[in-house]
Amino acid sequence: MAAPARASGRRGRSADRTDEVTDAVLDASRALVAVAARSLAGVADDVTLPQYRALVVLATEGARSLGELAAALGVHTSTATRMCDRLVRKRLVRRRQSSEDRRAVVLELTPTGRDLVAEVTARRRTEIARIVARVPRTARETLVSALSEFARAAGEEDVRESAAATVGVG
């Protein structure tokens, strides 16, 4: 099967190189998704990447209502409900009554769920560190700057600090 055509090679170079940067980010994202999948499979092969994403949201943002979790994941509430039902059965998430509104239910990680997020994060960190070690030293500073700007543009600027504090991973 032929590789997809590179947008930057087909259209020429624009002044801001948006197509070239987009292609590079797509390549990097494929590598990072593969790292995430391997890290998760090494810990819990019965947890899907979307389920893991829900666990990470709860780890970084704390207890959430089902609607808040669905919004954070960008899914319909019914999808989040089915996902959380599975996570509750796996004892990774628990439902509890809201302290502010007794009619409302909030979702939170169990200690097992928190441990799973911490273990997967540690595995991802180890594998990413191996990859970064293969990046030439002269490119690492640029990489840090570029990825930090990318994370900020995506609205992820403070996730690392809150995740590390929540799950005990630095």
Image: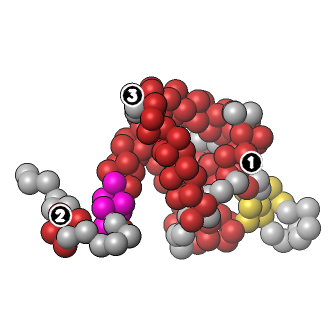
Side (left or right) of 144 relative to 95: left
Label 1 sits on a secondary structure element that is helix
37 shown above or below 15: above
The CA span between labels 2 and 3 is 26 Å
Q: Is residue 10 above or below residue 161?
A: below
The residue that mark 1 highlights is: 162
User: Between 112 and 59, which is closer to the camera in this rendering?
Assistant: 59
Which labelled disc corresponds to residue 134? 3
Q: Which residues are magenta?
A: 19-24
User: At label 2, which amino acid type do we have?
Assistant: Gly
Residue found at x 48% / y 38%: 140
Membership of 62 in magenta stretch: no
Q: Can residue 73 be seen by looking at this rendering?
A: no
Q: What residue appears at the point 54 percent right and 32 percent down from the top-left corner? A: 125
Q: CA distance from mark 2 to mark 1?
A: 40 Å
Q: Estimate the x, y position of residue 9 in percent, counting from the top left.
A: 17, 63
Which of the two labelled residues, at mark 2 and mark 1, occupies the earlier sequence position? 2
- The quadrant of the image that shows the C terminus is top right
Left or right: 159, with 81 as reference point? right
Kindly indicate whether the residue at mark 1 contacts the one at mark 3 (C-beta within 8 angstroms): no
Of tags 3 and 1, the one toward the viewer is 3
Task: Say which residue appears at 19% left-offset and 73% top-offset.
Answer: 11
Frontmost of labels 2 and 1 is 2
Residue 10 visible in the shown view: yes
Q: Which mark is residue 9?
A: 2
The percent position of residue 165, horizontal first and vertical second, equals: 77, 40
How many labels, in total?
A: 3
For mark 2, does the 10 Å Cα neighbourhood hold few (<14), some (14 to 19), or many (20 or more) residues?
few
- Mark 3–mark 1 distance (CA, rounded to whole Å): 28 Å
Looking at the image, tell me whether mark 3 or mark 1 is earlier in sequence order: 3
Is residue 140 found left or right of 22 in the rendered image? Answer: right
